[in-house]
Image: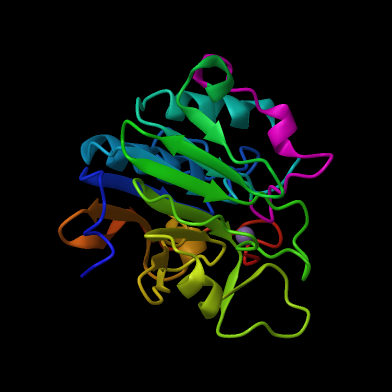
Amino acid sequence: MSRYDNRMTTRRVKLVHTSDVHLDGRFRSASSGGFRNSAERAFSRVIDVALAEEADLLLIVGDLFDHGRVLDDDFDFVREQLARLACPVVLLPGNHDVHDERSVWHRIEFDAHSSHNGGHVHLLLETDGDCLEFEDIGVRIWGRAMQEHAPENVPLKDVPPRHRELWNIGLAHGQVVEERVGMASSQITHEEIRDSGFDYLALGHVHVWRDHSQGSTRACYPGSPVAAYASDGGGHVAIATLCPERGVEILRCQVDEAEAPREQKPDGWLMM
Ligand SMILES: [Mn+2]
């Protein structure tokens, strides 16, 4: 008997999952087709995919912004792009856009699009973890906002017990490791993934595609959608379909192609 057999909700859910876009409108490149840079172009393509796939949900799992000093123009760009969607969008901070006292998330205002105003954009900003329930699409989403990228930060700490009637989806920004080691920051262990109870765990931080499924939890890094940051021949998103009969299926979908010569970012762009 599979864990799906006692599910009261039989809804099929399709989501698009991205992370590590590293938007920074000050970083401009010549060949970006009307966008200020390749990160904006790739983010726009993520939205294109969510529309084309008629996604029920878009997950943005950290490092949407490259740093906390981004310009108001960058917020305008994100608002314009997210306004193209009607489905819920859920965002989690990462280590480049941590939720501390100088947080970029204090500055951005989604106005009419924000969940505070009945809109479709939802921020997971609680550093002790935050749950969102979307009964109409049959999912519950949990994520713990990062205040500091440090060894003490445990992205999968205190995951709540499974909701019995909804799909259980987690968001976590950090480094997947077999076992917790040394003083590395924001570690996510295989055991924590296996014990999380999530049907799907949307990971962020690593810039290339990695499947980290453990036990009954399907988990992956989609990598950066920006080819220049993903460094594996293209930028991708994950399209996950949660199906009551077949479980969770994950598709890797390319959204951006590598250019030659490779774009240079002023400093630190190889950092995750
Ligand atoms: Mn990161």
Residue at point 60% right, 32% down?
A: 74
Q: Where is ligand 1, by quadrant?
A: bottom right
Q: With 93 as the anchor, is 78 left or right in this view?
A: left
Instruction: Specify the quadrant of the image occupied by residue 33.
Output: top left
Q: Looking at the picture, how far across and down is residue 139, in whole percent?
A: 37, 43
Q: Looking at the picture, how far across and down is residue 164, in whole percent?
A: 37, 51
Q: With 192 as the anchor, is 187 left or right in this view?
A: right
Magenta residues, dominant SS class: loop
* The magenta segment: 94-113
The residue nearer to you, when weighing 14 against 138, is 138
Residue at point 53% right, 28% down?
A: 77
| Magenta-drawn stretch contains 101 | yes
| Magenta-drawn stretch contains 269 | no
Instruction: Specify the quadrant of the image occupied by residue 126.
Output: top right
In the displayed orientation, state which residue is furthest to the right: 101
Residue at point 69% right, 35% down?
A: 105
Residue at point 39% right, 59% down?
A: 200
User: Compared with residue 38, is residue 54 higher up or lower down, i.e. above or below?
Assistant: above
In the displayed orientation, state which residue is furthest to the left: 245
Q: Which quarter of the rendering shows the C terminus?
A: bottom right
